[in-house]
Image (spheres, rainbow, N blue to C red):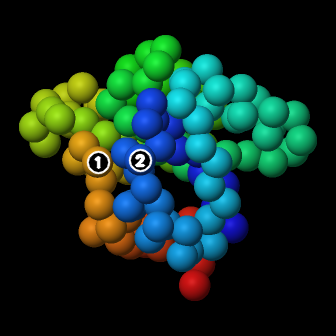
Amino acid sequence: MIYAVLAAKDKQTFEKMAGVLQQSPMDIQWTDTGKSVLERISRAGDKGKKIDLVITDETLADMTGRELVAQVIMTSPMTSCVAVSTLSADEFHETYEGYGVLMQLPPAPDAESGEKLVAILKKLNLIVT
């Protein structure tokens, strides 16, 4: 089971993609702030558990997606991150270089984006079928 947190100001941003993700062995939590993501990571660690995946929108209520990714990696280096971004592929790579982001998502990611993410998670053996 993968424990994931989806962070977006508007839950509808990820609804189409989440429909695909929920068909996998994945426990999904929703939040709208980076602070809440970081608190959930901390609480999970206190219980001997971990958040495996953070999917963040480009802009949250309290920080940018990039700021959240940077803080997640500092707090929980083994947590995988995925980020929505309107940057070109080259700009995204340059901006997120060194953070180990699994993939760039388009704004309002759809079911196909979810399928691509599931395929990556399977390749990394994070999802075992």
Q: Which residue is pictured at 65% across the width and 26% down the height?
A: 36
- In-image side of 6 versus 109 (left or right): right
Count of number-bearing discs: 2
**What residue did someone put label 2 on?**
12
Mark number displayed over residue 108: 1
- In-image side of 49 versus 28 (left or right): right
Residue 124 location, x and y as percent?
48, 66
Residue 75 location, x and y as percent?
64, 26
Q: Amino acid at mark 1?
A: Ala
Q: Amino acid at mark 2?
A: Gln
**For residue 45, above or below residue 80:** above
Q: Which secondary structure lies at badge 2?
A: helix
Q: Which residue is pictured at 44% across the width and 70% down the height?
A: 20
Q: Which residue is pictured at 17% across the width and 35% down the height?
A: 86
Quadrant in the rendering for residue 9: top left
Residue 25 location, x and y as percent?
63, 72
State which quarter of the image contains the N terminus.
bottom right
Specify which label sits upstream in the sequence, 1 or 2.
2
- In-image side of 87 versus 117 (left or right): left
User: In the image shown, does 98 or 20 lie closer to the viewer?
Assistant: 20
